[in-house]
Amino acid sequence: MNFMTRPIEALISLANLGHNFAQARHLAPAAQIMAVVKANAYGHGGVQVAGALAASADAFGVASLEEAVELRNAGIENPIVLLSGVFGRAEMREVARYGLATVIHCAEQMYLLLDTVLSQPINVWLKLDSGMHRLGFDTEGFCQAAVRLRAAKQVDQLTFISHLACADTPAATLNERQLQSFQDSLARLIVHANESVSLANSAALLTRPDMHFDRVRPGVMLYGVNPLNNTEPLPAEIELRPVMTLRSRIVALQTVAAGEGVGYGETWRAPGALGSPSAQSSRIAVVAVGYGDGYPRHARNGCPVLVNGEPAPIAGRVSMDLLSVDVSAIANAKVGDVVTLWGEGLPVETVAEHSETIAYELLTGVNQRVKFTYF
């Protein structure tokens, strides 16, 4: 028996992914590039994205051992780094078993490594807290840890790393303070020839060549999102293309009289006085997508979608499986028409702004109820 499925789908353009990676390579031609594919490649499919970039990326960054093992089991042979480190002795052994690298960001992780017998030495990324105050050693601990790890039989190569708190706001003074803290700490320990340095995320890759060092770590820019907090334009020579286009179709049309409400709580009402015989009614399209698919429930009235490429505003509260769109200005809208929620023609950043969130949350929130198609 053949079944029709809900029309919500995420189209993933691997060509656009490759284009965005090439933009990163253009900006930092002398640096190695770690493509960050944590959180299922920001919701795009970790295995598929890593497979598409395997011939280009110098390494991949993930958040957990599980993500790394999934890539290894899929045949990804590139270096893979656990960006949050490990959470126990058994995981440390698995890092060696699968030929992974790990961040060491605290004394507990360092002693766990030093007290564990490994099947082979591993590459370690030693992390400095240069001012974000989330993960990392202070300067004194960072330099002491470097001495211990350089002498450890469990360690093959060292990379020195820190993370920027405000790179998405290039004018923030913390950027300069963090760079200076990082450079001062590196000067104290004197980086050896077989060691490397990494600081730049997507935003710093785009705006701060002085932060590129030996390795850069682009994440969200690979997926076509401007990482500069929508406060700064991209460099003139850079074009990022959306990798995910989330789309569905109109499944019903409603005629709503002036003053009548739409959806839970009647947060949107058709223009005009309730019961007015002369007021024009509104035409509402019901679209098969909701917060159960990962579309933000808190998207405000007026948040745009594209109906057959034409902009139209959301009307009413997003529900679990459906949302309503005012298509009064699109006379030919009909059941079955394609509705783009974000992607080609409608940046995900725009939807995020109307939803009081960030593009990262929207992309990583698309769930497995949505059909993914790679092309």
Image (cartoon, helix red, strand yellow):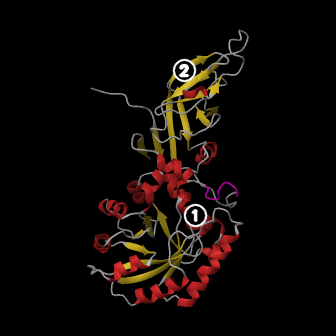
- Main SS type for the magenta part? loop
- Quick one: 139 or 158, which is closer to the camera? 139
* Residue under numbered circle 2: 253
- Estimate the spatial distance between the alpha carbons at disc 1 and disc 2, rounded to whole Å: 42 Å
Q: Residue at x 48, y 30 (%)?
A: 288
Q: Is residue 126 above or below residue 193?
A: above
How far from the left and from the top, in percent, is residue 220?
A: 54, 58
Q: Is residue 319 magenta?
A: no
Which region of the structure is painted magenta? Answer: 226-232
Amino acid type, label 1: Ser
Mark 1 and mark 2 lie on one chain; the one further toward the N terminus is 1
Any part of residue 103 in sight: yes
Q: Residues at badges 1 and 2 in contact (C-beta under 8 Å)?
A: no
Q: Is residue 227 magenta?
A: yes
- Quick one: 273 or 339, which is closer to the camera? 273
Any part of residue 332 in sight: no
* Residue under numbered circle 1: 202
Residue occupying the far top of the picture: 277
How far from the left and from the top, in percent, is residue 358?
A: 58, 51
Q: Quadrant of residue 51?
A: bottom left
How far from the left and from the top, in percent, is residue 20?
A: 55, 58
Q: Quadrant of residue 138?
A: bottom right
- Quick one: 341 or 356, which is closer to the camera? 356
- Number of labels in the image equals 2
**Is 356 on the left or on the right of 289, as rendered?**
right
- Secondary structure beneath label 2: strand
Q: Is residue 273 above or below residue 326?
A: above
Q: Residue at x 45, y 76 (%)?
A: 106
Q: Quadrant of residue 200?
A: bottom right
